Amino acid sequence: MNPATAYKRRAIESATPVGLVVLLYQAAVVDLRRALAAMENDPDSPRQIEVRTQACHRVLAIVGELKGALNFEQGGEVARNFGRFYELAERLIVQAGFQKDPEPVRELLQQFSAILNAWREVEARPAAAPPVQAAWSA
């Protein structure tokens, strides 16, 4: 196993539930940036099509993980709102991938970045702060 893979594996294995959400959002932001760059830089070249397609597929997989982790019983309205957001994200990613339209990706990148920053703030709270895990089953 190469060092980068080993580092990522250790980060995932040692992360808290909130830390895992942060890692997923970070990965989504990275892949949304890749998809956006591929759409803006010669979108019809075979290499950019491949980059865009792979990045969109990874974001869809991440959104699927986030959606699957929602706990609607404990999370209530917050979980339902995230569920609707994830469904919208899935539609926009598929639309952007097929139409080579960077605008939906730009919008999603802004939203995922804002939510990532909010989760980072939650993660940085002292241990004595009340937990904010109710929307997720993790």
Image (cartoon, helix red, strand yellow):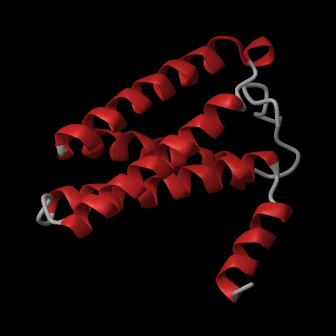
Q: Is residue 66 above or below residue 87?
A: below
Image quarter in which the N terminus is found:
bottom right
Front residue of 108 and 122: 108
Front residue of 126 and 8: 8
Residue found at x 75% / y 79%: 6
Residue found at x 73% / y 15%: 72
Q: Where is residue 81? Give x, y as percent.
A: 54, 18
Task: Say whether residue 104 is left or right of residue 73.
Answer: left
Q: Where is residue 77? Give x, y as percent.
A: 63, 11
Front residue of 99 and 3: 99
Q: Where is residue 26? Give x, y as percent.
A: 54, 57
Residue found at x 54% / y 38%: 63
Q: Where is residue 49? Give x, y as percent.
A: 25, 59
Task: Say whether residue 124 is left or right of residue 86.
Answer: right
Image quarter in which the C terminus is found:
top right
Residue furthest out toward the front = 46
Residue furthest out toward the right = 128
Task: Say whether residue 40 is left or right of residue 94.
Answer: left
Q: Is residue 2 above or below residue 46?
A: below
Q: Is residue 1 above or below residue 65?
A: below
